[in-house]
Amino acid sequence: MGWSPTLTWLRWGPKMQLHRRILQPPFTRSKVGQYMPLQRREALVCCKGFVDDPSDWVTAARRFALAIVLSISYGLEIDGPSSPWIRLAQESNNAIAKSGAPASSIMDRFPATRYLPAWLPFLERLRYARKWRWAIESITSQPLEASIEEMKRKLDRSCFAHDRLQIYRENAEKGLPNDFDFEDIKGAAATITIAGNDTTAATVMLLVLYLMQNPDAQRKAQEEVDRVVGRDRLPDWDDIPHLDYVHLVLQETYRMNPLSPLGIPHASVADDVYEGMLIPKGTIVYPNVWAMNHDETVYAEPFRFWPERYLPREEGGNGEPFPVGNFGFGRRICIGRNLAENSLLIQLAMMLATVDIDWPPGPDGKPTPFEPEWSFRGQAIVLPFRASITARSEKVKELLDSEIRAAGQTA
Ligand code: HEM
């Protein structure tokens, strides 16, 4: 579909290992702290977007997720809800989402089929890939080109692409070997934006959904935020370790709806035996994350949103384990999981501090429950839905405005 070497699509081997080596260092638990000011600022902007235009809260959520990864990858900023980067990211997200479940096309099984003429009747997926190639090429090329242009003017700006290009150029000038080339930098920078944008936005949408559907959990989480933070300021990073219930709300959101219910499939690199069954080399294995997280022998009433389930019994819980697999497993586990968790925690705390979320009004003007719609094309994503989002007080509006001004960010 027009990908540069992009980690998620690379098979196990030297190229894939090189990309993990380039991508992992900035996203370890100790290194993601460098992005905290950016994440909090974007959470402020997102909540201001919720307050200013609740009817378009989904754009604010998408902007939040994209602004973080675009800044980390390319040092680019999103200057408003109509930024062209939001449209570009949405087009590529759509192209990916509609391209079908991973590893399920005839091209995945028999790579040579990608060179066949696309008019052949059984090659819908090949026709689709050729039709949408431009969207993937745009998201992998255009931000990098813009970033390189910006770098010429703002040489002090540090970002993933800039830092790698700098190393690459310095080595080339000194005649030293480079273990990655320009295409690798292009692919790795795009991986951060593509892998980290839709996933984080989709989880923010789930948070809004579950808070709306579960007013008791919302109230309890707000009480905790008010107790720890107070009502005269907005949540900051020092507060996060003290927000125990907020952490449980996030874990329960992960468990209720893993975005990749069947994980990302992987082919076994050698023959293996699991519980007496032979898994021959090359078998495509799907981890059923959905089943693991809804297993009735592990989770009581698995379809109920119940954050307390993880607490020990003596604290009124059920001592159940945190969900597994939402970020994958083993050697291909998600590189951005620490970054994502921080983004979601500060965003959740900020939402709880600033807005009340309720069902939207029905024809009689009263909050009216409804069933949201979902997309199940490879990922399980809730489609945009209406919600009634209102500022908790005039004071939070003032705080949002003044903090955003202080951070020098346009909303
Ligand atoms: C809630 C947010 C996120 C979720 C649920 C999520 C989930 C996943 C999953 C299920 C995988 C596949 C793991 C496997 O193959 O077993 C993955 C891979 C990956 N994710 Fe995330 N992710 C999220 C956010 C992010 C962010 C913010 C980044 C940005 C750095 C990121 C970067 C990656 C990369 C680079 C891979 C490919 C790893 C590989 O193939 O070796 N993800 N993610």
Image (spheres, rainbow, N blue to C red):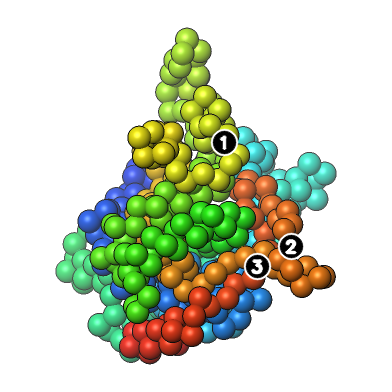
Q: Percent from the top left, x then y, of residue 176?
A: 19, 62
Along the line of sight, which residue is nearer the eye, 117 or 36?
36
Q: Is 69 placed left or right of 376 in the picture?
A: left
Percent coordinates x, y for residue 175 in the rendering: 19, 65
Question: Farthest top residue?
Answer: 276
Label 3 sits on a secondary structure element that is: loop
Position of residue 63 measured from the top left corner of the image (x, y, whole percent): 52, 73
Mark 2: give few (<14), some (14-19) or many (20+) Cα within 10 Å: few
Q: First in sequence, mark 3 or 2: give its number.
A: 2
Q: Which dot, 2 or 1, sits closer to the camera?
A: 2
Residue 54, visible in the rendered structure: yes
Instruction: Report, in whole angstroms, how far the alpha carbon at label 2 lies from the one at label 1.
Output: 25 Å
Crowding near the residue tagged with mark 3, few <14, some 14–19, many ≥20 C-alpha atoms within 10 Å = many
Instruction: State whether label 3 is within 8 Å of ligand 1.
Output: no
Rounded to the nearest angstrom, the CA distance separating label 3 from label 1 is 25 Å
Q: Amino acid at mark 1?
A: Pro
Residue depicted at 82% across the width and 70% down the height: 363
Q: Residue at 38% across / 67% down in the picture?
A: 226
Q: Amino acid at mark 3?
A: Ala
Which residue is identified by label 3?
387
Sequence order check: which comes first, mark 3 or mark 1? 1
**Secondary structure of the residue carrying numbered label 2:** loop
Whether label 1 lies within 8 Å of ligand 1 gets the answer: no
Name which residue type carries label 2.
Thr
| Residue picked out by circle 1 | 302
Above or below: residue 93 compared with residue 285 = below
Q: Secondary structure at mark 1?
A: loop
Q: Nearer the viewer, residue 335 or 161?
A: 335
Give the residue at mark 2: 368
Image quadrant where residue 383 sits? bottom right
Q: Does residue 179 appear in this view? A: no
Q: State which quarter of the image contains the N terminus.
A: bottom right
